[in-house]
Image (cartoon, rainbow, N blue to C red):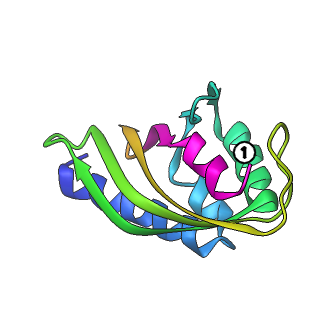
Amino acid sequence: MERQATTALIQRYYDAFNRGGDREGFLAMLAPTVEHDLNNAGREIGVPAFRAFMQRMDRCYYEQITDLVVFASESGARAAAEFTVLGTYRETDDGLPPASGQTYRLPAGAFFEMHDGRVGRVTMYYNLKEWLRQIGA
């Protein structure tokens, strides 16, 4: 993929994320063996694992991505995105403090590798301690 195609794919990825109701369209942008590095929580592999992750996220959180900036290598093989997450913690997630509709605003980022025109790896980062502070933990 060329740089422009990669940046367009990452933009579409976050556009689909923000739409929320089109999870299958969102997941179609992933390579079958996508590697998903969760923020300080290990790695999950494959679209079924990513689907389960998104189902949990959709149940526990409402999030929108704003202030998106996408960068890509000249070859388009790798990319990065920086953005702000505007969210509401709506249902208690396993191992985390109780949810009561707390809102948060966090800077975040992600790193990507492309595989055959799709997202082959996503590595997420945000400041967990800051999120915990914002939800009153």
Q: Secondary structure at mark 1?
A: helix
- Considering only vertical position in the picture, is 121 above or below 99? above
- Left or right: where 111 falls relative to 25: left
Can the viewer see residue 61 in this picture? yes
Can the viewer see residue 115 in this picture? no
- Left or right: where 13 falls relative to 55: left
- Considering only vertical position in the picture, is 46 above or below 72? above
Q: x%, y% of residue 24?
A: 66, 61
Is residue 131 rendered magenta in the image? yes
Q: x%, y% of residue 71?
A: 24, 51
Q: x%, y% of residue 23?
A: 67, 63
* Residue type at numbered disc 1: Phe
Relative to the observer, which residue lies in front, 120 or 101?
101
Q: Which residue is mark 1?
A: 53
Question: Residue pushed farthest left?
Answer: 74
Relative to the observer, which residue lies in front, 128 or 122?
128
Is residue 123 rendered magenta in the image? yes
Residue 52 position by quadrant: top right
Q: Residue at x 85, y 59 (%)?
A: 91
Q: Residue at x 84, y 65 (%)?
A: 100
- Left or right: where 76 falls relative to 48: left
| Part of the protein shown in magenta | 119-137
How many numbered marks appear? 1
Q: x%, y% of residue 93?
A: 82, 47
Q: Residue at x 79, y 58 (%)?
A: 60
Q: Residue at x 26, y 46 (%)?
A: 1
**Badge 1 density bin: few <14, some 14–19, many ≥20, Cα 10 Å:** some
